[in-house]
Amino acid sequence: MENANGTQGSHDGTPEASITNPSAAVSKPVPRATVNPALLPLGSQLEQLRPILATNTTLLRVLDLAAQLRLPDWYLAGGAVSQTIWNFMSGHAPEAGIRDYDLVYYDASDLSWEAEDAVIKRAQRAFEAAGVAAEVEIRNQARVHLWYGAKFGVECAPHGSVEAAIDSWISTSAMIGVRPARRDGHACGADDGWDVYAPRGLSDFFNLVVRPNPVLGKREQYMSKVVRWQQHWDNLVIEPWPSS
């Protein structure tokens, strides 16, 4: 597997792509790209990614507050990230169609619901105190296997890392995570460099291509998401669920 920086990656703590000199954050929408970043080399795509995501001020605020929570092995991941890119590429408002923000972390030291619930409540208090109105969903990816089968009817093996969990998500359009870069073992703020985990690269995000990831889950789950996404982004290119 390759990370977004083109280097070989794994699920055992391999560093992700790091943007060490990010562009200054912007708080208002920017014009639609005149050159599709998908046509650029990967390094240039990473440089484009930061200011595109920075058009979504809620995303930046969630990132900054999440860093202060000091959760283990965490990312802001999934739809809020990819959909911010879709909005930019489509000329939509930065937060249009975004239902929630997925904050995922990995802590195998305590797999009890009580431990996860304590993290969720602590995070919710922090977001509420900061005036974040958007819904932020917090999940410990180390314990997904304990409830996934009952909810979706497909058994899920334990994930070995937060990256492994992201790799299993139902669509490649959700397989992206960002977080402030780490220095001396500590996360920086959202205004500093970012770590980016994108195991399938970035081109599909800029091209608005949605592909199924059938390693876990069912066709019905994928199609349910596709139908909702197309209501907000009718220019998506949808790849079908494999027939076998």
Image (spheres, rainbow, N blue to C red):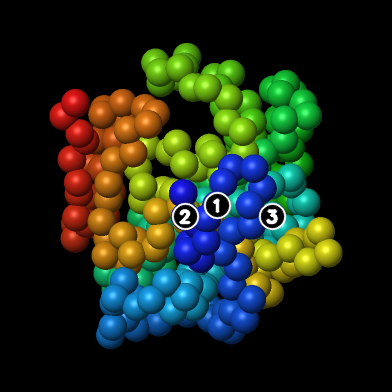
Q: Position of residue 93 (x, y in %)?
A: 37, 69
Q: Position of residue 110 (x, y in %)?
A: 77, 26
Amino acid type of disc 3? Ala
The C terminus lies in which quarter of the figure? top left
Q: Is residue 125 visible?
A: no
* Residue in the foreground of this view, choosing between 155 and 13: 13
- Element type where label 1 sits in the image: loop
Tell me how far mark 2 sits from mark 3, CA to CA: 26 Å
For residue 171, side relative to residue 55 (left or right): left
From the top left corner, tell me how far across and down residue 91 is, in percent: 29, 73
Residue of label 3 = 66
Instruction: Note whether 43 is above or below 128 in the view shown.
Output: below
Query: Which of disc 3 and disc 2 is earlier in sequence?
Result: 2
Q: Sequence-wise, which precedes: disc 3 or disc 1?
A: 1
Disc 2 marks which amino acid? Glu
Q: How many marks?
A: 3
Q: Which label belongs to residue 9?
A: 1
Q: Residue at point 39% right, 63% down?
A: 202
N-term-proximal mark, 1 vs 2: 2
Percent x, y for residue 163? 56, 44
Left or right: residue 152 versus residue 230 is: right
Callouts 1 and 2 close, C-beta under 8 Å: yes
Query: Viewer-proximal residue, 30 or 104?
Result: 104
Where residue 2 is drawn, which disc sits there? 2
Label 3 CA crowd tier, 10 Å (few <14, some 14–19, many 20+)? many
